[in-house]
Image (spheres, rainbow, N blue to C red):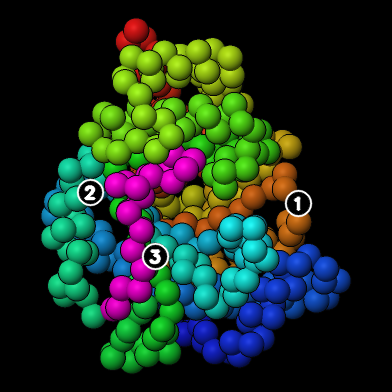
Amino acid sequence: MKKRQIDPKKFSKKKTDEAGDILRCGKGNNDENTKALTILSNWRAAHSYPMHIFRKRLKRVSEKIDKKAITAERLKRVPSIIKKLNRKYSGNAATMKLTQMQDIAGCRVVLSNVNLVWKLYNDYYKTKGDLKHVKVNEKNYIKFPKEDGYRSLHLVYRYISDKGKDIYNGLLIEVQIRSELQHIWATAVETVDFFTGQAIKSNEGRKDWRTFFKLVSSAFAMMEKCPVVPDLQTNEKKLYLKIKRTEKDLKVISKMRKWTDSVRIFDNFKNKNNFHFLLLELDTIQEKLSVSAFSKRSEDKAISSYAEAEKKIFGRKEYDVVLVGTDKLVDLKRAYPNYFFDTREFIKRLEIIINKY
């Protein structure tokens, strides 16, 4: 059976942006929100095919460099899309349109160390090489860490095809390249956000938690011989002792261990070796995570299930849902440890820091 193509032009660009505006403002009634979510879901789903193409290449080239490389893909969650549509820059009113968003769909690779990050970038992404797609943006958060401590390489491409898939031409796909240490930090931040209801990831959380993650980011950067957060220039001993004091005040390790132990995970995997898409549904009230698996041939069902699940929980912060793509269950847990509340690797690195001095 020929796979159905999801038409990104099913709704006009104007209609798509209007749907984004309705959801951004949060003033729509139930019918308006439902219609807007339908339009947004179609626009997001249309990015699925080009996203697969980018991840396929990312997996192929990264495994040439690092056999332990982990690749994954994801369609951006509705709450994250709305938050980004509401983002204000330099105090100005929010102006971003849904069709302008560059990370609706993204694929990511996690490499064993930062040297392999640079090798992958230099060998396969610095110049166009065999890529026919057009790079439209590049942000180097490793050389220039974000204020909150986030570090990674972000590359955005405009998809171009001449092989019968031109319906997707012009869609934007983000490629993220990070080291294992950078990944451990980023997913630990997301885990804390889930359990504390903060937005550290958006630099909006409590000051003490934000400071803690800035300090740890800088310690990890020192380990990788990379630039630290600009306002945290200090020597290793002073930095490590600050982390030790802050960890003690916040009880980070004991809290993270408790969170990991508290969450119950339920899955409906009939065949754990035959899936490509996983729908993760989080209920923070009952502290449980439900995981549903879909084969590559069931992509349409996976995407529609994702859209329906988001409609059901729209506006309810105690629930979360995300659709991710990966080839192996073990890679899922390593690529998205935050959804399994697995902070063991972060704790292991943190204990090295606090026990050194």
Reply yes or no: does residue 145 show up in magenta: yes
Foreground tag (2 vs 1): 2
Confirm whether residue 297 shows in the render. Answer: no
Q: Residue 174's mark?
A: 3
Q: Are marks 3 and 2 in contact (CB under 8 Å)?
A: no
Q: Residue 316's mark?
A: 1
Confirm whether residue 31 shows in the render. Answer: yes
Q: Nearer the viewer, residue 186 or 11?
A: 186
Quick check: 16 above or below 86?
below
Who comes first in sequence, dot 2 or dot 1?
A: 2
Element class at badge 3: strand
For label 3, count other residues whose C-alpha is less than 10 Å away and answer few (under 14), some (14-19) or many (20+): many
**Gap between marks 3 and 2 measured at Cα:** 16 Å
Find disc 2 in the rendering and name its residue. 117
* Residue at x 57% of width, y 29% of height: 209
Who comes first in sequence, dot 3 or dot 2?
A: 2
Residue 148 is situated, as x and y percent measured from the top left of the image, at: 49, 40
* Residue at x 43% of width, y 89% of height: 167
Q: Quadrant of residue 295?
A: bottom left
Residue 85 is situated, as x and y percent measured from the top left of the image, at: 62, 65
**Gap between marks 2 and 1 measured at Cα:** 37 Å
Element class at badge 2: helix
Indicate the amino acid at tag 3. Answer: Glu
* Residue at x 41% of width, y 30% of height: 232
Element class at badge 1: loop
Foreground tag (1 vs 3): 3
Residue 153 is situated, as x and y percent measured from the top left of the image, at: 32, 54
Q: Which residues are magenta?
A: 133-155
Quick check: 74 above or below 352?
below
**Gap between marks 1 and 3 measured at Cα:** 27 Å
